[in-house]
Each structure stands twice: as C-alpha cells, then as structure tokens.
C-alpha cells in the first residue's frame, strides 16, 4: 500500500519571537488578570481566555453610526485631499512571500501571514492610508469556520481523505479583516445599437425517408436588424471591490453576498485577537474595477431598453456624478495547508460561513473511479452482447 501523503500547516517553521518592546497602543489587557482580551465572534464583547473575564463593547450611537457609514467624496480621495481625520499611519509589515500588507494590533508582534502561512514579524514601518470607516464583526468563531470548511471539503469529489481529516484536526484558522472599497455613483448613459426581431420564412428541403428522397417544407428563423439609440440611468450603491491583491478575486467573489447592513463603525476593539490587512489596491485602481462592474450592469440595462429578440450594443458613453466611496473591512477565516508539496488555501466568510478555496485532488480516488467506470462499462457491454 502506498505511503500516505504528508500534511503540514505551512511551508515554513515558526520563527523565534524577536526581543522587541511591544507597542502599548491598541492593547486590550484584562482588568482582572492583565492577560490579553480577544473579541468574541457573534457577540459585542471581549473575553479573556485566561480567566474568563468579559468586557462589553459599547454600542455606537445612531449619530456615530451615520457618521461612520458616511461616504467620502471620490474626487477628493483620488487627489489625496481627504481631511487629516480620514487618514492614518498603521504599523504594517509586507509579507515577504505574497506581498500582503499585514497590520498588527494589540500586543501581537509575530504571526503567520493569513494568506500564504509565511512567518511575519512586525516591523517599524508605517504606511499612510485611508482609515477604515466601518467593518462587519466576525459572527463565526474559529470552530464553526473550521467545521464549515471540513463540510465543504467533504462534499468535493476526489478530495484526499487525509486533507479533509487534517482540516478537521489541524492548526487553527486565522481570522483576518480584509480591506474592501465600496463605491456609489449616479450614472447616465447614452447608447447606439441594433434591435433584432425574429421572423420566419418557409423553404422546401429534400430528406431521405426509408432510403427514398422526399420533399418537405420547414420554417427557417431569420433576424431583422434595426438601428436604435437611447438613454438609460442607474444609481449605484455600495459596489463592492476587493482592496488587496493577496487573495484571488475568484475566492472573494465566491464568498459573496455580504450583508453590508451589518456594518458597524470601526473600533479597534473588534480587532482584538485578529489580524487585519492594509489595502494594496489603490483607491484609483479600485475605482476602475468598480466602473467595470457598473458597466456590466449598464449593458444589461441597455439590452432591456433596446428590447426585441436580440440586441447589439455598438457604443456606450456614460457620465458619472455624485461619486463617493468607503473603506471597509470584512471578516474572513483563512487556512493554508500543504499537501504533497503543494500549498492549498481556503477562505471562509466570517459572517455567513460560505467557503471557497483551491480544489485538491486524490490520485488514488481518481484511479479507483476510472477502474470502477471501466468495470461498469465492461459489464454493460457483456450483457448487451448476450442479449
């Protein structure tokens, strides 16, 4: 029997913790024993894992919520002309492997990159960035996220059994707040195109019936095209764009939808015990992505406006006005597992439990399926010949 494939939680060993003085900013000491508090997912409180002490997070007043969820003017943001109160210089460290900009909070000064499992140690550099205005707090704890990932792996055909088992019992997932942009815009588009209308013509064809030619009539569909032009308008609200290049976009797109109605004003308390990544996709590049998403919706609006049976869109010109944006953080549990020399990454929506990731395959399961299929085909062929 072949040797079982090996599993390891990361491609690198844990580094020794450096002898550094921990920054006292954004520390959450327990007022009972002095140990570090952690945010409890699904609750509005910080919990001490050492003594069990609970500290409640004050709920934001309605006025604070409205202010936190207010929009920044996009033009000012693109000019780097936002008020000083909207900016910050968080302590960040770029991952030496994947380039993720990992932010450190509280007393933490060494961790693994949540995106690729590479050891990361806090540095001394800062990076001037737009402050996050709001976030969705984690609703799923690590155990629930791990169970969701194990169920997802278990439903995959040909997934190695060892990887599924390791995912259930392996190292803990990393909870990370991942940066996103949201964009609003009032759009007005003019277009030109063609409307296609179906019509039918009758033609005579010759077919073979019992070896003899016969003539039949059939209906042939054709399309009549007419030039059209017009205008459409749409108000876009909270078009969501990933603000990091550390995760494949297909992963984060697959984690949607998010309930943005659950956004809370940004408070460092929600980061206690978690990591956060600074954005690496600029506001300008994020706006380009948002316009591409808007363009797809606008194209659908135009097709409906053209009507008919088919539509051709030749030209579109869109004016954007009242453009605003927000910088928000969304909760994602992450894991990176090494299987047979290859690292597989999995992400879990920390709000809903939806899972995405790289699909592993078991060569033995595939081989067994091929052999089983060949046996079934052979049996069916045998009985077919007998009959």
Image: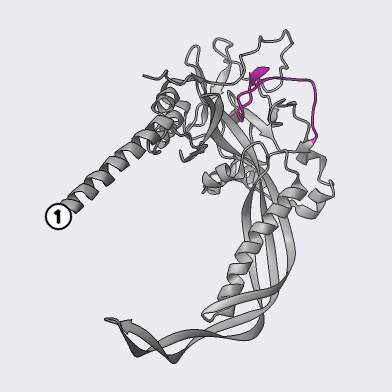
Q: Residue placed farthest to the front in the image?
A: 211
- Residue 59 sits in which quadrant? top right
Residue 56 in view, yes or no? no
- Where does residue 107 sit, x and y in percent of width and height? 66, 17
Q: Which quadrant: the N terminus? A: top left
Q: Is residue 122 inside the magenta stretch?
A: yes
**Residue 321 versus residue 8 in the image, above or below:** below
The residue lying at 64 percent from left, 31 percent from top is 276
- Where does residue 370 sit, x and y in percent of width and height? 36, 39
- Where does residue 206 sit, x and y in percent of width and height? 38, 87
How is the protein colored in the picture?
A: one colour
Q: Which residue is mark 1?
A: 387
Residue 252 in view, yes or no? yes
Q: Is residue 267 left or right of residue 173?
A: right
Of residues 152 and 385, the one drawn nearer to the viewer in this rendering? 385
Of residues 322 and 284, the one drawn nearer to the viewer in this rendering? 284
- Residue 131 sits in which quadrant? top right
Q: What is the count of numbered marks?
A: 1
**Residue 86 versus residue 4 in the image, above or below:** below
Q: Residue placed farthest to the left in the image?
A: 387
- Where does residue 33 sit, x and y in percent of width and height? 55, 9
The residue lying at 69 percent from left, 66 percent from top is 187
The residue lying at 38 percent from left, 34 percent from top is 367
Q: Main secondary structure of the magenta part?
A: loop
**What residue span does the magenta drawing correspond to?**
106-128
């Amino acid at each position: 029997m072949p040797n079982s494939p090996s599993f390891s939680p990361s491609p690198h060993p844990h580094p020794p913790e450096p002898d550094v003085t921990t920054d006292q900013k954004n520390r959450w000491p327990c007022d009972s024993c002095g140990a570090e508090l952690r945010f409890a997912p699904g609750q509005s409180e910080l919990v001490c894992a050492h003594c069990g002490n609970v500290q409640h997070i004050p709920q934001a007043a309605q006025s604070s919520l409205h202010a936190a969820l207010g929009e920044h003017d996009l033009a000012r943001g693109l000019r780097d002309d936002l008020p000083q109160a909207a900016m910050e210089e968080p302590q960040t460290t770029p991952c030496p492997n994947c380039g993720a900009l990992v932010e450190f909070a509280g007393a933490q000064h060494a961790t693994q990159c949540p995106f690729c499992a590479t050891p990361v140690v806090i540095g001394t550099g800062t990076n001037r960035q737009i402050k996050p205005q709001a976030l969705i707090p984690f609703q799923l704890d690590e155990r629930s996220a791990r169970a969701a990932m194990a169920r997802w792996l278990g439903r995959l055909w040909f997934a190695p059994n060892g990887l599924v088992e390791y995912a259930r019992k392996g190292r803990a997932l990393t909870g990370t707040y991942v940066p996103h942009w949201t964009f609003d815009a009032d759009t007005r588009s003019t277009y030109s195109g063609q409307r296609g209308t179906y019509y039918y013509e009758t033609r005579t064809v010759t077919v073979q019936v019992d070896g003899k030619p016969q003539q039949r009539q059939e209906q042939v569909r054709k399309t009549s095209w007419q030039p059209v032009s017009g205008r459409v308008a749409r108000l876009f609200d909270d078009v969501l764009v990933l603000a990091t290049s550390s995760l494949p976009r297909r992963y984060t797109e697959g984690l949607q939808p998010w309930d943005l109605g659950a956004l809370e004003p940004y408070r460092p308390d929600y980061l206690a015990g978690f990591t956060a990544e600074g954005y690496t996709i600029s506001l300008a590049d994020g706006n380009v992505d948002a316009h591409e998403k808007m363009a797809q919706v606008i194209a659908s609006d135009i097709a409906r406006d053209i009507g008919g049976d088919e539509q051709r869109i030749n030209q579109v010109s869109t004016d954007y006005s009242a453009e605003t944006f927000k910088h928000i953080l969304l909760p994602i549990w992450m894991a990176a597992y090494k299987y047979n020399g290859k690292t597989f990454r999995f992400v879990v929506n920390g709000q809903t439990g939806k899972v995405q990731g790289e699909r592993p395959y078991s060569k033995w399961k595939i081989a067994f399926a091929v052999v089983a299929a060949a046996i079934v085909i052979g049996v069916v062929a045998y009985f077919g010949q007998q009959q």
